[in-house]
Amino acid sequence: MDELNVAAQAPSGKRARRSRKKTIAGIVAFMMLSAVAAFAYWTAGGTGTGTADTGETLALTANQTTVLTAMYPGDSPQTISGDFDNPNEGPVYVTSVTAAITGVAGGDGACSAADYTLATPEMLVGAEVEAGTGVGAWTGATIQFNNTVANQDGCKNATVTLTYTIV
């Protein structure tokens, strides 16, 4: 009976080998076709264009936040400080703020910018000022009423106008 079993199994072993060979041959053929298909494509060159816009920077405003007291001959220097209004959508870099006396008005007589000392008028900021109102800071300039030997009654009740330039 053992011989019968061996004889009966022989044809199925050959069939299994043939089937395995067909399967391997099919896989190899599929891989070759896939490799060819993976490299079968067209190439082309070309050009294109695009655009990008940049916004504009709106002017910042320097706000004096220090409330200066009334000045008089022999008075001490008063520090001037402030902040900014930045109407832009994003931050703006500020290098400095420079103060200047641009007018003297309303005195009881002859009074001019020469009657006052504005020290350290250029105040370094060196920072980005965020968008918004009352943002950032600047400080450092001082203003003082000069004490001279002459009569200075002309400057009584005078208003000194300070102008700020932002760079």
Image (cartoon, rainbow, N blue to C red):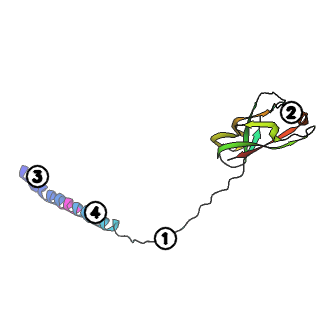
Q: Residues within 10 Å of mark 3 (few under 14, many from 20)?
A: few
Magenta stretch contains residue 19: yes
**Quick one: SS at disc 3?**
helix
Q: Which residue is found at the position 11% from the left and 57% from the top?
A: 10
Q: Which residue is found at the position 76% from the left and 40% from the top?
A: 63
Task: Identify which residue, 34 or 57, lies in the foreground.
Answer: 57
Q: Which mark is residue 31?
A: 4
Instruction: Inspect the image, locate mark 2, and give the three-letter code of the amino acid beneath it.
Output: Ala
Q: Is residue 87 above or below residue 117?
A: below
Q: In this figure, which residue is indicated by the disc labeled 3?
A: 5
Tell me the distance, in whole angstroms, between the alpha carbons under discs 1 and 3: 74 Å
Magenta stretch contains residue 85: no
Which quadrant would residue 54 be assigned to in this image?
bottom right
The earlier-in-sequence mark between 1 and 4 is 4
**Quick one: SS at disc 4?**
helix
Q: Which of pointers 1 and 4 indicates the residue nearer the eye?
A: 1
Instruction: Inspect the image, locate mark 3, and give the three-letter code of the amino acid beneath it.
Output: Asn
Q: Which residue is found at the position 27% from the left and 65% from the top?
A: 32
Using residue 33 as the reference point, say whether residue 134 is left or right of it. right
Q: What is the magenta range?
A: 18-22
Using residue 52 as the reference point, say whether residue 29 is left or right of it. left
Q: In this figure, which residue is indicated by the disc labeled 2?
A: 150
Instruction: Inspect the image, locate mark 4, and give the three-letter code of the amino acid beneath it.
Output: Met
Tell me the distance, in whole angstroms, between the alpha carbons under discs 1 and 2: 79 Å
The earlier-in-sequence mark between 2 and 3 is 3
Task: Identify which residue, 136 or 148, lies in the foreground.
Answer: 148
Q: In this figure, which residue is indicated by the disc labeled 1?
A: 47
Tell me the distance, in whole angstroms, between the alpha carbons under discs 2 and 4: 106 Å
